[in-house]
Amino acid sequence: MKITFAPEEILQTIEMVAHEHLDIRTITMGISLLDCVGGIAEMEKKIYDKIARKAERLVDVGARLESQYGIPIIHKRVAVTPVGMISSHLDPEGLVRLAKVLDRAAENVGVNFIGGYSALVQKGMTLGDQKLIEQIPQALAETERVCSSVNIGSTKAGINMDAVLQMGRVILAAAQRTADRDGIAAAKLVVFCNAPEDNPFMAGAFHGPGEPECVINVGVSGPGVVANVVKKHPEADFGELVNLIKRTAFKITRMGELIAQSASEELDIPFGIVDLSLAPTPAIGDSVADILEAMGLERCGTHGTTAALALLNDAVKKGGAMASSHVGGLSGAFIPVSEDAGMVRAVEDGALTLDKLEAMTCVCSVGLDMIAVPGDVSAETLAAIIADEAAIGMINKKTTAVRLIPAIGKKAGERVEFGGLLGGAPVMPLHPFSSAQFVRRGGRIPAPITSLSN
């Protein structure tokens, strides 16, 4: 059913766009590559041609909808079948060639990122998965647009600790290969527990095995809109505050579904989901931390922050679910440090630590996201951080993720700069004590008793 807006809703939307940083963060086209299997030369041609054919109008349609509705659409992106599912017969050189053909195809259709250089290894690794993961550092270092993700755990399967330790090594190697660019390759790599198959946001987007041949997913954003509403009602109690946020999320999600349906019709591709996540940017006034501080916290990270984030995340989901029957992806509040000016301020002021961020991930949409750590960090310490975050996701039946950037040659308190929406951030300190013996045990942490829900 086509969405229609009353005149007053249109005026409200114009106000949100003009003054509160409201935007469609991404239109992401998911494309299946399951029919592209073959020898490496054949695969390169099939993959390039299919992405070029399916996504050739994606950017133009996005620009036309942006003009038609007056709503900024920041990114147009592509997500493909996890490459680990179609590449087990290839050698390491062939796997890097696949990353480069994805990069060329993304450049050809004009998208800024393409996701899906990925593997799903929550219960174990095939030989193909193992080879792919080993090539991630080189693949990300030698491409501009390719993003990678690895799912190492789930509530049903438990946590694959062999994969966790390997991902610690992979993250460090990716950062080392791009040390001259503040470890940018690691910023394009995310490690998941309970990864959703329809997430439109990078770096974690991939076209899951349960998805159709091709699909349109949209990610909306509006931290500035929500922050403005909260600031206007400083005396509201929590019940009133939740209702205010729910109504705001409802409006944002309706706008997202309108764009998604319109893009679907113009491209003649099925509409998948709207991800109603509050995704911040480095711009002042477009911050999840600002929302939490508007609720009455002197600085994000102080006592009460986790409760405030829980309220926010739940209210956003409830409001969005009333606006659309196709809510999916992650949907909630993101807390990426480098991409949120308020989070950066909180780190610089000493209010926000890695331990507090970990506690906040119990109730946020995703997890430890875009966090710079000292360059002398060990692979085992990175693996232990991943294991902690995966345990939160596994036990709580939610998606959690880790996107850490070892800042090679830098220490805690120094800065990294990535530019654009990736922003920049202070390098955060880590605990000095070793977790190496723990993460080297190997094997699989079993699924919790709550997994027996059938």
Image (spheres, rainbow, N blue to C red):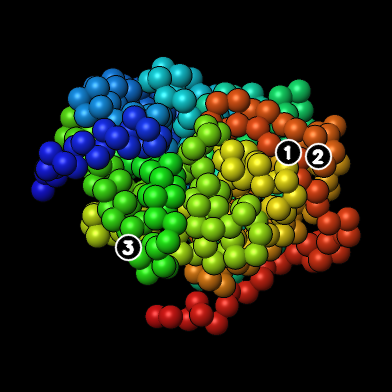
Asked if residue 437 lies left or right of residue 192, the reply is right
Secondary structure of the residue carrying numbered label 2: loop
Instruction: Between residue 209 and residue 249, name the one nearer to us.
Output: 249
Q: Is residue 33 above or below residue 53?
A: below
Please name the residue shown 72% across and 59% down the image. Answer: 355
Nearer the N terminus, badge 1 or badge 2? 2
Please name the residue shown 54% across and 58% down the image. Answer: 296
Asked if residue 113 lies left or right of residue 232, the reply is right
| Residue at the farthest top position | 108
Q: Nearer the viewer, mark 1 or mark 3?
A: 3
Secondary structure of the residue carrying numbered label 3: helix
The percent coordinates of residue 357 (x first, y second) are: 65, 56
Query: Which residue lies under the disc numbered 2?
Result: 413
Say what amino acid the circle numbered 3 marks: Asn
The percent coordinates of residue 26 (x first, y second) are: 38, 35
Given contact means CB atoms under 8 Å apart, are the residues at marks 1 and 2 in contact? yes
Query: Which residue lies under the disc numbered 1?
Result: 426
